[in-house]
Amino acid sequence: EEQEKVTKELKESVEALATRIGPQGAATHSTPRTNHFLQKMTKQDDVEAFLMTFERTAEREGWPKESCAGLVAPYLAGDAQKAYFDLELKDAQDYDKLKGEIMTRLGMTTAVGLPTRTTTPKADV
C-alpha cells in the first residue's frame, strides 16, 4: 500500500515535470552547443564553404535564426571577423547582414555565391 502511494506520487511528479518542459523536451530551452559541431576558421578555410557548413548545421540542429550571428561570431577569423567587429551592434546580430558584409568584403555576392567579375571573360576564338 505504501509502495503504491509512493509510485503514484512519483508518477504525478514526472507527469507534472513533463508538462512544464513541453513536448519538445528540455533541449529546446538549452543553449546550442556549437563547439560540438564547429571549429574556428583558419587562414586556409574557404569562407563561403565555412558559412554554408554553419548554415546547414544550424538548420539541422534547429538553432534559431535570430541567434545565428552570435553563434558563428566566435568562430570567425581574418576578414570575416573584421567584418563582424566593424558592423554596428544591431547589424552584427543579424546573420543575413553579417554574411552580406563578409561576402562583400571578399568580392562575392550572396545571391549566387560566386566571385563577382571585374572584367568580362574573353571568348575562345
Image (spheres, grey):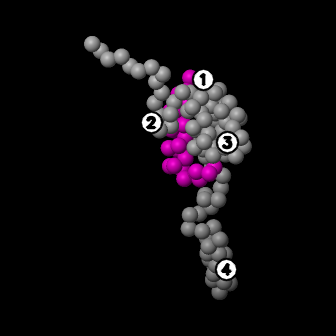
Q: Where residue 30 sits in the image (x, y, percent)?
A: 65, 55
What residue lies at 54% left-to-right and 37% top-to-bottom?
51
Q: Which residue is mark 3?
A: 92
Q: CA distance from mark 2 to mark 4?
A: 59 Å
Q: Where residue 90 sits in the image (x, y, percent)?
A: 70, 46
Question: Which picture quadrant has residue 8?
Answer: bottom right
Mark 1 vs mark 2, foreground winner is 2
Structural crowding at the residue carrying mark 3, measured as other residues with C-alpha within 10 Å and reported as few (<14), some (14–19) or many (≥20)? many
If you read the primary sequence from the N terminus, does the residue marked by circle 2 or circle 4 appear first? 4
Q: Identify the element where label 4 is drawn.
A: helix
Q: Where residue 89 sits in the image (x, y, percent)?
A: 72, 43
Structural crowding at the residue carrying mark 2, measured as other residues with C-alpha within 10 Å and reported as few (<14), some (14–19) or many (≥20)? few
| Residue situated furthest top in the rendering | 125
Give the extent of the magenta segment.
Answer: 44-67
Q: Which residue is mark 1?
A: 43
Q: Quadrant of the C terminus?
A: top left
Q: Nearer the viewer, residue 86 or 37?
A: 86
Mark 2 vs mark 4, foreground winner is 2
What residue lies at 62% left-to-right and 51% top-to-bottom?
66
Mark 3 vs mark 1, foreground winner is 3
Q: CA distance from mark 4 to mark 1?
A: 58 Å
Q: CA distance from mark 3 to mark 1?
A: 22 Å
Looking at numbered disc 4 in the image, what kind of residue is underneath it? Glu
Looking at numbered disc 2 in the image, what kind of residue is underneath it? Val
If you read the primary sequence from the N terminus, does the residue marked by circle 4 or circle 3 appear first? 4
